[in-house]
Image: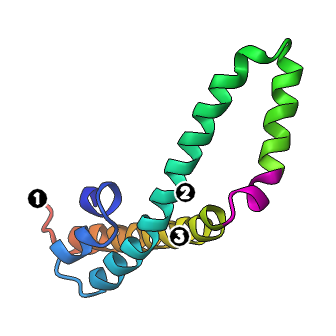
Amino acid sequence: MMANQFTLPGVGSLAAGRRVGYAQVALGLIGVVPMLAFSIRVLIAAYHVRQTVGSFGALDELTDYVQRGMREIPNTWGLYFWVGLPGTVLFIIAWLWALASSISILLESRKETPRS
């Protein structure tokens, strides 16, 4: 379960001998690359916001600036947004699928373990 949830989705399923792990790994890899590009872009944007924080006179001005920026993300970020968002969704689907597999593997292991 730890390998499935905290490394790459599907690794734990493969370790448990389930062939569905190959599909989970593929879906996770397809999703993680664009998600990583999007995450790096978010970090760069956060850095730029941090650099401009000193120029705001009040918290309300900063809040307005951030809210305007959030509304403009789909337009100003272009490819990063339109590739990163579906990539994130694909990775989340792979992660949830791996979670379901992990729970299934744990339930099966409890059935097979003799009680003392």
Question: What residue sits right under mark 2 in the picture?
Answer: 38
Q: Residue at x 54, y 41 (%)?
A: 43
Residue 5: image location, x then y, percent: 35, 59
Residues 43 and 1: in front is 43
**From what the image shows, is residue 64 above or below residue 44?**
above
Looking at the image, tell me whether mark 3 or mark 2 is earlier in sequence order.
Answer: 2
- Callout 3 environment at 10 Å: few (<14), some (14 to 19), or many (20+)? many
* Side of 52 relative to 99 (left or right): right
Looking at the image, tell me whether mark 1 or mark 2 is earlier in sequence order.
Answer: 2
Single out the mark in the foreground, 1 or 2: 2
User: Which of the 4 image quadrants contains residue 21?
Assistant: bottom left
Residue 78: image location, x then y, percent: 69, 64
The quadrant of the rendering that contains the N terminus is bottom left
Q: Residue at x 31, y 64 (%)?
A: 8
Q: Residue at x 70, y 24 (%)?
A: 52
What amino acid type is highlighted by mark number 2? Phe
Question: What residue sits right under mark 3 in the picture?
Answer: 87
User: Which of the 4 image quadrants contains residue 81?
Assistant: bottom right
User: Which of the 4 image quadrants contains residue 14?
Assistant: bottom left
Single out the mark in the foreground, 3 or 2: 2
Q: CA distance from mark 1 to mark 3?
A: 47 Å
Looking at the image, tell me whether mark 1 or mark 3 is earlier in sequence order.
Answer: 3
**Magenta: main secondary structure:** helix
Residue 111: image location, x then y, percent: 24, 73
Q: CA distance from mark 1 to mark 2?
A: 51 Å
Question: What residue sits right under mark 1 in the picture?
Answer: 116
* Side of 1 relative to 41 (left or right): left
Look at the image and give the residue range highlighted in magenta.
Answer: 72-78
Q: Are marks 3 and 2 in contact (CB under 8 Å)?
A: yes
Query: Is residue 3 inside the magenta stretch?
Result: no
- Callout 2 environment at 10 Å: few (<14), some (14 to 19), or many (20+)? many
What amino acid type is highlighted by mark number 3? Gly
